[in-house]
Amino acid sequence: MIITIENLVKSYEDVVALKGVSFQVEKGEIFGLLGPNGAGKTTLMEIICGLRRFDEGKVTILDMDIEKEADKVKGLIGFCPQETLLYRYLSVRENLVFAASLYSLSSKETKERIRFLAKFLGLEEFLDKRVEKLSGGMKRRASLAASLMHDPEIVILDEPTVGFDPNVKREFWELIKQLHSEGKTILLSTHNMEEADALCDRVAIMDLGKIVALDKPETLKKRYGSGAVIHVKVKGSHVEKAAKLLRRWKPKLEDGELKIFVKDPWKLMPELSSTLFGKGILAEKIEVTEPTLEDVFLNLTGKRLVEGEAV
């Protein structure tokens, strides 16, 4: 394991931000922390990066204790926070040179890393622009470049696509996938269910300072999801007849559609179709809605996750 967290506790006066959190991250995986604002994700990441002290527990990176060997550990990590921490009046290039100096990179190494990262992250034409002149998406790319200047083994991304429009968000997802393909271990926090599902090998669902479930997204959906739903829509005059034909599957009529809740929808769909067709009923629509991580979060916490808030 590249990261091991054991019984981590952190309090801020009367608020307990982390309540005995434990998990491990495997080398080379994308590990997601999924939960609302206030779940403890950022606190946890800042502790792993050595930016915040904790009250109880233990954190090890490649078997090194983060408290006893802090300098060695920090050299293994590249942290890209939610906020852009670049100097706004400096150019992207000047910020990257400064980042390189923090890790004592030589002039040659610095130039090579800037050349590589500019191409990798699509920053080539923006290198000599001041950060304040960049769009939000380009600022985030430049910030990620700064966190990667020392070629870290572990990349920690705190809500990397928050505030992005869907197109820019998906572009950033592709960058994360590319980093993963380069062999990086990635720890990613998000409150975006789709993002966690699309990117993460495993997901830890956090709520109120605790991990309430941890596994592969597909496993979580099968174990804690509400099951798949088959939506059947027929012409209005035939909906009652269709409901009777399909009654052994206990369909529910909602908004003019029959909804059938099953565990293996793809196996059942041909039988549903042939049953209706055999009685002369043509379905306008037969489609499947799979369980989502939203269902998982709702079933585990009793709350929905909306715009980063649990409600």
Image (spheres, rainbow, N blue to C red):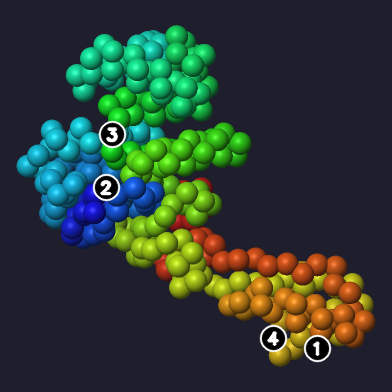
Determine the CA span between mark 3 and mark 2. 19 Å
Judging by the rendered image, the residue that carries numbered circle 3 is 152
Determine the CA span between mark 3 and mark 1. 61 Å
- Residue at image position (29%, 53%) is 25
Residue 100: percent from the left, percent from the top? Answer: 27, 19
Q: Residue 249 carries which label?
A: 4
Q: Residue 44 carries which label?
A: 2
Rendered view: 196 above or below 239: above
Q: Which of marks 1 and 2 is nearer the N terminus?
A: 2
Judging by the rendered image, the residue that carries numbered circle 1 is 244
Q: Which of marks 3 and 1 is nearer the N terminus?
A: 3
- Check the picture and name the quadrant holding the N terminus: bottom left
Three-letter amino acid code at the position of disc 1: Lys
Residue 201: percent from the left, percent from the top? Answer: 42, 55
Rendered view: 308 above or below 211: above
Q: Which of marks 2 and 4 is nearer the N terminus?
A: 2
Task: Determine which quarter of the picture holds residue 287.
Answer: bottom right
- Residue at image position (46%, 61%) is 217
